[in-house]
Amino acid sequence: MLTVISPAKRLDWTHRDVEMTAPRFQSEAEALAGTARKLSVEELMKLMGISRDLAGLNAERFARFGEADLRPAALCFAGDTYAGLEAGTLGEDALRYAQGHLRILSGLYGLLRPLDGIEAYRLEMGSRLKTKKGATLYEWWGDRIARALNEEAATVGAGTLVNCASVEYFSAVDPQALNLDVVTPVFLEEKAEGPRIVSFFAKKARGAMARFIVENRLTEPSEILDFETGGYVHAPELSEPGKPAFLRRAASEAAAA
């Protein structure tokens, strides 16, 4: 199986000393950075919905793109999903397996392997950055990410894609071009009003699921039903075809928080 996760806005620029690889869509990333470089601080503020200080920081990043320091993708993203993935604590064998079976969707880089070297950036997939291909990054990437996933799945003999990414990012994977079966785990919290998704916990659980798959070298979709990290258990009564649900009881939620 292949597993995909989202990137993170927050970065941790310290990392374990590992040999980095080159992103598949490096030239596309350079082209996008070149487009973003032309925007003013005010335009970046509006594009990303961020403060002037953050917009200034990202203007500087785009200005020097292609010359800045690199970090391995899975080790430098620091959001909730990566708190669950804990890539920095993976052993060498697990990290090597992740390099073949785990992918990070990216607005700037398209599709990343865990050890692909990236520059510090911020560019969400939902950004309405105008390019020669259209008014959004979805139009820019078109079916290229889906076709790349098909090729990389064929390389490792995978027929299933486990979607642990957000809706924003997985929407960049063209379903008509994708030749893989998709399984999207759903993580729910037990509440008085009934089971519901809590974004913070769901993001962390998606990262933990990706780690579970990598550490255990899972190859069949049915094997992910054994996931119990953080107190979640498979809930068949809440599941739908292609969307296995995992429920965490209130006591487990409180302990995890």
Image (cartoon, helix red, strand yellow):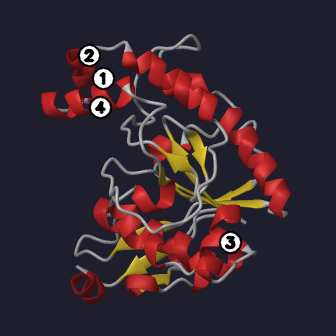
Q: Are marks 2 and 1 in contact (CB under 8 Å)?
A: yes
The secondary structure type at the circle numbered 4 is helix
Judge depth for marks 4 and 1 and give the one in front. Answer: 4
Q: CA distance from mark 4 to mark 1?
A: 12 Å
Q: Earlier in the sequence, mark 4 or mark 3?
A: 4
Residue type (three-letter) at the residue carrying disc 1 = Leu
Residue under label 3? 97
The secondary structure type at the circle numbered 2 is helix
Q: Is residue 58 left or right of residue 73?
A: left
Residue under label 4? 58
For label 3, the crowd category at 10 Å Cα-Cα, with few meaning under 14, some 14 to 19 and many 20 or more, is some
Q: Residue at x 40, y 22 (%)?
A: 128
Judging depth in this view, the residue of 250 and 214 nearest the camera is 214
Q: Are marks 4 and 1 in contact (CB under 8 Å)?
A: no
Q: CA distance from mark 1 to mark 3?
A: 36 Å
Residue type (three-letter) at the residue carrying disc 4 = Asn
Q: Is residue 174 left or right of residue 202?
A: right
The dot on residue 43 is 2
Q: Quadrant of the rendered structure where residue 254 is? A: bottom left
Residue under label 1? 47
Image coordinates for residue 118, horizontal then vertical, percent? 49, 45
Residue type (three-letter) at the residue carrying disc 2 = Glu
